[in-house]
Image: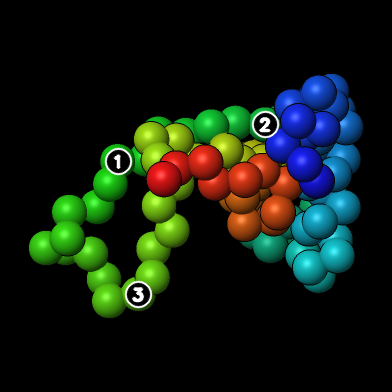
Amino acid sequence: MPVNAWIAASDTEKINQALTRLRERGVPNSCPRCGHYSWIAELVAFHASPMPPSVRPSINIANVGSYIPALALTCRNCGSIFQHNLITLGLMENTTP
């Protein structure tokens, strides 16, 4: 989805698009901790500080800037929280140079 279309979409539309991407990628609907199917879905951005090169693992780490845009899913039964990166889901572009 083009960035401008994503920005213009309502939060409900964005959440539904993210949930659709998760289903397309085979993410199960049930909570892996307790097995329930009731979720609270929220769009969030959490702070991410760059990892110093001296402690960086030898894997390719995407540079996502000072925050990571995500869909947070909270199980209504047990409270487990799962975060899904919206850049990785292809719903936002990584604008960090």
Name the residue carrying label 3. Answer: 59
Q: Residue furthest bottom?
A: 58
Q: Residues within 10 Å of mark 2 (few under 14, many from 20)?
A: some
Distance from Cα at disc 3 to Cα at disc 2: 27 Å
Label 2 sits on a secondary structure element that is: strand
Residue at image position (72%, 37%) is 3
Give the foreground label among 3 and 2: 3
Instruction: Give the number of the mark in front: 2 or 1.
Output: 1
Viewer-side residue, 92 vs 27: 92
Q: Amino acid at mark 2?
A: Leu
Q: Residue at x 84, y 27 (%)?
A: 9
In the rendered image, which residue does mark 2 sit on?
43
Q: Position of residue 23 (x, y in %)?
A: 85, 61
| Observer-nearest of 23 and 66 | 66
Q: CA distance from mark 1 to mark 3?
A: 17 Å
Residue type indicated by callout 3? Ile
- Give the percent coordinates (x, y) of residue 89: 69, 55
Residue wearing tag 1: 49
User: Horizontal and vertical percent for residue 72?
Assistant: 64, 40
